[in-house]
Image (spheres, rainbow, N blue to C red):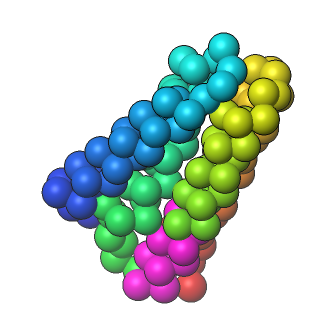
Amino acid sequence: MRIHPVNMLVAIVVGALLTYGITAVDANTMKLTIGVGSFVFMAATLGTAFGVTFENGRAGVNIRVVGTLFFVVAVALNLAFATLGLSQTSYIVTSGILFLVFVLVANAIHSARQ
């Protein structure tokens, strides 16, 4: 696994800008929770999708696809929680479970020997 610093920086900044946009739209009182949760989720998925290359080409493509898919899910999830006014507990549980599923799937793909 090799990290590309410029691509990783761009992915983190894009995640931060999207987080700012989501917290600006947030109609709830949990701006800090959605801000931190969305930044971690989006920066991790975008960083995995665009900022890292892998020795195994097949695994690298699969991890990029998983990262991009979970990024789209993260954007939809955070927009839904920012606009619908749902509880903070449900946001933390839902976002946490999805993030851990992303980590589990990416790790399973990376460690699979083909």
Is the residue 28 above or below the residue 104 in the image? Answer: above
Location of residue 54 in the rendering, given as x and y in whole percent from the top left corner: 36, 72
Q: Quadrant of residue 46?
A: bottom left
User: Closest to the observer: 27 or 111?
Assistant: 27
Q: Is residue 41 shown to the viewer in this render?
A: yes
User: Closest to the observer: 72 or 109?
Assistant: 72
Is the residue 47 above or below the residue 30 in the image? Answer: below
Q: Identify the residue at horizontal 36%, vertical 42% (top origin).
A: 17
Is the residue 10 above or below the residue 108 in the image? Answer: above
Q: How many marks?
A: 0
Main SS type for the magenta part? Answer: helix
Location of residue 61 in the rendering, given as x and y in whole percent from the top left corner: 47, 80
Q: Identify the residue at horizontal 68%, vertical 21% (top origin).
A: 28
- For residue 1, side relative to residue 90 (left or right): left
Q: Is residue 39 shown to the viewer in this render?
A: no
Is the residue 11 above or below the residue 85 in the image? Answer: below
Q: Identify the residue at horizontal 54%, vertical 18% (top origin).
A: 32
Range shown magenta: 57-67
71 drawn magenta? no
Q: Quadrant of residue 8?
A: bottom left
Q: Residue furthest top?
A: 29
Location of residue 82 in the rendering, given as x and y in whole percent from the top left corner: 66, 34
Q: Identify the residue at horizontal 56%, vertical 85% (top origin).
A: 114
59 drawn magenta? yes
Q: Quadrant of the N terminus?
A: bottom left
Location of residue 108 in the rendering, given as x and y in whole percent from the top left corner: 63, 63
